[in-house]
Image (cartoon, rainbow, N blue to C red):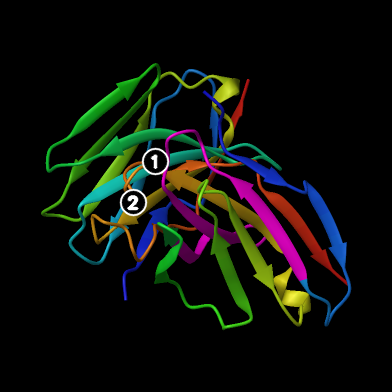
Amino acid sequence: ELKVEQNPLFLSMQEGKNYTIYCNYSTTSDRLYWYRQDPGKSLESLFVLLSNGAVKQEGRLMASLDTKARLSTLHITAAVHDLSATYFCAVDIQGGGADGLTFGKGTHLIIQP
Amino acid sequence: ETGVTQSPTHLIKTRGQQVTLRCSSQSGHNTVSWYQQALGQGPQFIFQYYREEENGRGNFPPRFSGLQFPNYSSELNVNALELDDSALYLCASSLHNYEQYFGPGTRLTVT
């Protein structure tokens, strides 16, 4: 059974600081996704990582994937309040996705002025 | 281009009742997946439909069933509702199950 673990599960940080969220998974995967969820809202796709060594950046967020270590990271640079949300990583092990995405429990991020 | 839409937005049902949730796929997408997200948890995969056939299922009992229509829209049906079925139900559409795009969700409360 595929397991996806995120840490930390809760993070409170100050604006301007840098931090990293980690996502470990237990089975070889074709794809890894990062999503953002605001309270009471749906999931917003942030990044799709498709290969070992993949790195993607959008604004203050950067995601990377190490398939050999089964590890993805989401790095936040110079955090701003608007980045406060819950962040999920999700793994697709089949490539065709018939098992769906397996999500981590999420990292609840609060960025304080 | 129209995104994924879901209806209704909110729903309150009584234990033992049946419920139907609806999802319209993003234009051009042929695959629909349904997820259940309990409060404070990550979404859990219920099942997936491709070309009107269920082609993958998570660890959910048979009282969770679905349909996909020729226009790729989909329904999720839940029979014999239990209190633990209270959750946000998310529909996601994709093309040949590449990147999944999520709808706004239906918040189901079972009392």
Q: Position of residue B91 (x, y in %)?
A: 56, 51
Total number of numbered discs in the rendering: 2
CA distance for labels 1 and 2: 10 Å
Q: Residues within 10 Å of mark 1 (few under 14, many from 20)?
A: many
Q: Is residue B110 above or below residue A95?
A: below
Q: Nearer the viewer, residue A88 or B76?
A: B76
**Which residue bears the numbered disc 1?**
A34
Instruction: Tell me: B53 left or right of B13.
Output: left
Q: Is residue B83 above or below residue A16?
A: below
- Using the image, name the chain to which the residue with label 1 belongs: A
Q: Residues within 10 Å of mark 2 (few under 14, many from 20)?
A: many
Q: Are marks 1 and 2 on the same chain?
A: yes
Closer to viewer: mark 1 or mark 2: 1
Q: Nearer the viewer, residue B43 or B65?
A: B65
**Which residue bears the numbered disc 2?**
A23
Per the rendered image, the range of residues in magenta is B19-48
Query: Per the image, is B35 magenta?
Result: yes
Instruction: Tell me: A36 left or right of B86.
Output: left
Callout 1: SS:
strand
Amino acid type of the residue tagged 1 in the rendering: Trp
Q: Is residue A33 above or below residue B52?
A: above
Residue B45 seen: yes
Amino acid type of the residue tagged 2 in the rendering: Cys
| On-image quarter of the C terminus of chain A | top right
Which residue is pictured at 72% across the width and 78% down the height?
B79
Sequence order check, earlier mark of 1 and 2? 2
Q: Nearer the viewer, residue A78 or B59?
A: B59
Q: Position of residue A21 (x, y in %)?
A: 38, 42
Instruction: Tell me: B73 left or right of B15.
Output: left
